[in-house]
Image (spheres, grey):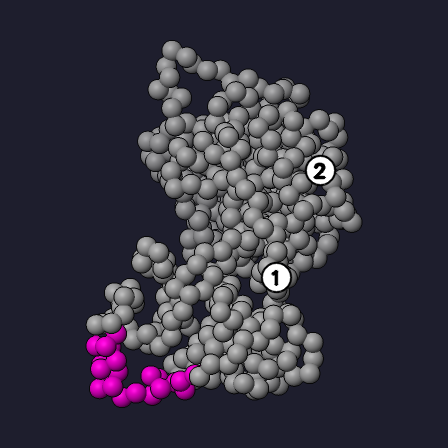
Amino acid sequence: VTKRNPKDYIFGKVIGEGSYSTVYLAKDIHTNREHAIKVCEKQQIIREKKREQVRREKDALNILSNSGSSLFVKLYCTFQDAERLYFVMSYAKNGDLLPYINKVGSFDAACTRFYSGEILRALEHLHDLKIMHRDLKPENILLDHNMHIKVADFGCSKILEQPDAVEKSILNESNPRQRSNSFVGTAQYVSPELLTEKTISPSSDLWALGCIIYQMIAGLPPFRSRSEYMLFKKILNLDYVYPDGFNADAKDLVQKLLVLDPNERLGTKDEQRYTSIRSHPFYKDLDFDTLHVTTPPPIYPYLPGNSEGQELRSQYRVPDHLEPGLDDKQLTRLLGLDGQSSSTTTPAPAPRPRKRSGILHMNDEEKQHQLHQQKCNSKWHSLVEGNLIVKQGLVDKRKGLFARRRMLMLTMGPHLYYADPVTMTLKGEIPWSPQLRVEPKNFRIFFVHTPNRTYYLEDPEGFALEWCKAIEEMRVNTYGVSPTTCA
């Protein structure tokens, strides 16, 4: 086989970056096949003392690529020149798992069951080959063209030499500085034993699986803190909570995986495969052995239910035969209030007088007058970058099972700002584009769909429809009639 070199590939866009490497989408000029090529800078590797990490990744990928499993990125070849090392790998065209969790807020039970099931199968194969990943997280779970997983990034991996070894780490007590702040993996998913350096075992990957299942269900990882010190303290104290509405079977599974003693985690006593995890009630009716030929469940916007309301789903696509816009007739149809059953039992609030889009049709002089009044009288003026506020109100901004009270402000521009009403600080902005769509779910809850994310908003006063009308009116006024496909 002829040794490859960079001229055998057409390098395209950057699809990933690390401290010493860049990943490019590239095309093989001989086969026309697309690859992900990881390009490592030799000087950076030496400077950051990452030689061992690069070697580990190459060794693990070689073993996995020869094992025949489709659950991992495949290493096709490696080569080098004077300045760089090149890893030619399979290209997962749908990116990694994290943006999908962020886009929809959280996964429903079916998606969580499927994707965590595929991750479990990958861990079974990995651990059977005596390889520990040690940096399992949503960013390292890639998705191929069929939306099946491919586990990636083996720079932190460890290949166990002895079949049944649970390797004791060698602690250099005479040089404590060498140990400070050194752990393998990513802070939010790292297991307690990797922090205390007591043992190294495949059980660390099962801890990470528990963290990922929690994040799929709740929308955020179980252990969160602004400082790494406090984050590690939470992990070592098992300090995390289950928000209201967390799936009961998933909670039981996560509790059995997030166990401080690595030898007591569910699965660690299994002799063949992780049968105790496979047989957990959360995976009832899931056929693990046919997952690779099963069509993955679609990842749609989804707001999980809690003690205050039922779950809400969306497969929102505007059909071609329906009229564009969001007038009263369309809202009635969307909410199922035209004689059909409504998706909620929430009673309609009493209607309140509504100003008809006056601000949108003001002349410049009138707008300047309103802006002057706002500057003098509104405490929110300094947060909206000098834009005229059209509508404002308190909402609960929900992400998965978590919610935060925010002041939502629709302004000219257009802009949709949200701020912390207690600290009076701007927290973010919902990005506008012609593709933005609002979707009322009931009188309190509405979804704002954007190309990269769905925002879940709840008006505690029950005037979600007014928000939908105001936002849609602004969209039509700004962009006119836009494409009928919702993000």
Would you say residue 361 sits in the magenta stretch? Answer: yes
Front-most of 85 and 415? 415
What amino acid is labelled 2 in the image? Ile
Point out residue 343 in the picture as x, y percentages from the top left corner. Answer: 65, 71
What amino acid is labelled 1 in the image? Gly
Q: Residues within 10 Å of mark 2 (few under 14, many from 20)?
A: many
Q: Secondary structure at mark 2?
A: helix
Q: Secondary structure at mark 1?
A: loop
Residue 75 appears in which quarter of the rendering?
Answer: top right
Badge 1 is on which residue?
309
Q: Which residues are magenta?
A: 354-374
Mark 2 near mark 1, Cβ–Cβ under 8 Å? no
Q: Residue at x 60, y 39 (%)?
A: 210
- Which label sits on residue 277? 2
Point out residue 293 in the picture as x, y percentages from the top left corner. Answer: 73, 52
Is 426 above or below relative to 214?
below
Q: Residue at x 35, y 56 (%)?
A: 422
Dot 2 or dot 1, earlier in sequence = 2
Q: Main secondary structure of the magenta part?
A: helix
Point out residue 304 in the picture as x, y percentages from the top left corner. Answer: 60, 57
Is 158 above or below relative to 431?
above
Front-most of 315 and 26? 315
